[in-house]
Amino acid sequence: MDNYRILVVDDELLIRDLLYDFFTSQGWDIVVADGGQKAIDYLKNQKFDVVLTDLKMPDIDGMDLTGRIRSLYNDLPVIIMTGYPSLDSAVEALRFKVDDYIVKPFNVNQLFKIVKKVAELKRQGAEAKT
Amino acid sequence: MARSKNIVVIDPEEFIRQLLGEYFEELGYEVKAVARVSDGLEIISAGNVEVALIDTGSASDRNYLDAVDRLRVARPGLKVVLITGYPTLDGVINALRHGVYDIVVKPFRLEDLKETVDRACQPSVESDVENQLRGRIRLLEELLQKNGIKIPGGKSTLKGPADKQSDSPYGIGDDPVGSVSIINDSDAIND
């Protein structure tokens, strides 16, 4: 089964729209959040295969969100995307066991490949456990 | 009394091997210190090692991530800590993709390294099954690639997020920062 459910978190409407249209066109179930707090609210009530989050956001930023995800849903894959990459944030992401760290601008097809691989691995891991 | 924790130090410099060996042994760790990755691999395959400390100088820049993969395949759940003098964004992102546990930048305080190793030795909630899968998938793909065998349909569910195949969005260890940035004018978007 190729249908995955993704939570995209980005404060930029353009990115949310772009990713919403793209992932939907690929048959994915996508939920978008415009900030970390809204993402946390969604995570409390819904299940996702992967979270794709921007780093710089006004309320709860992507790293804080990742930290909260790691403490609450440790196995949930998280991919960070950022237009402001830095050594510090990459090291922090590594320590949070982030599944990938994508630098903007990116090609949406290639981003999709990365996200799909992460989601597939997650599902294979879950199936291997059962 | 808790059992002692086993760590392997892989560092080309004898002085560093000795220093870290003595330091961690005094703290109650069982330490094996070797100069080469292949020696470390042998120890890790044979024993119950929790943590491997690898100086990235102990393998060439292009190869140390390969070494990380092999060590983690040899012992799923192994925590690999890289010690590096020259961290780069590209290097850290690649390390992240290969499941490196932490990166310690030289010069470092022994106390800081101890904290990292102590943390790494804590019981893990990370899924060993996923680790094992990820490592074996990558090794299998490398094997297929080396033998010129294509995965049917060009679509593999076996790929890890950080594979080295030519259709990978980015080549691991091949490029500097360029391997991280994914740019296509037609789809370029900015934060």
Image: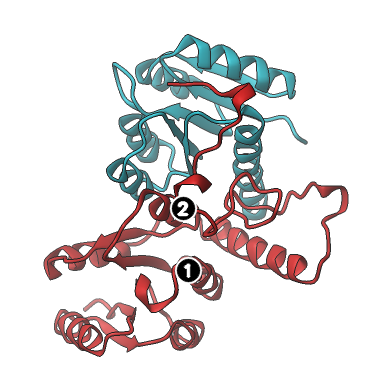
Instruction: Quickly name the residue at label 2.
Output: B176
Q: Dot 2: what SS? A: loop
**Which residue type carries mark 2?**
Pro
Q: CA distance from mark 2 to mark 1?
A: 18 Å
**Which residue type carries mark 1?**
Val
Is residue B14 found left or right of B191 in the rendered image?
left
State the image coordinates of residue B183 (x, y, percent, origin top left): 56, 33
Instruction: Depth check: give the residue in front, B183 or B94.
Output: B183
Mark 2 / mark 1, whichever is N-terminal: 1
Quadrant in the picture for the N terminus of chain A: top right
Q: How many marks?
A: 2
Whether residue A68 is situated above or below residue B142 in the rendered picture: above
Q: Residue at x 57, y 59 (%)?
A: B129
Is residue B81 found left or right of A29 in the rendered image?
left
Graded by Cα atoms within 10 Å as few (under 14), some (14 to 19) or many (20 or more), the crowding at tag 1 reads: many
Chain to which the residue tagged by mark 1 belongs: B
- Quarter where residue B150 is shown: bottom right
Chain to which the residue tagged by mark 2 belongs: B
Q: Residue at x 74, y 23 (%)?
A: A27
The hue used for chain A is cyan
Q: Residue at x 14, y 70 (%)?
A: B110
- Residue B68 numbered mark, or none: 1
The hue used for chain B is red
State the image coordinates of residue B30 (x, y, percent, origin top left): 28, 85
Q: Residue furthest front?
A: B185
Q: Dot 1: what SS? A: helix
Instruction: Inspect this view and state whether residue B119 appears.
Output: no
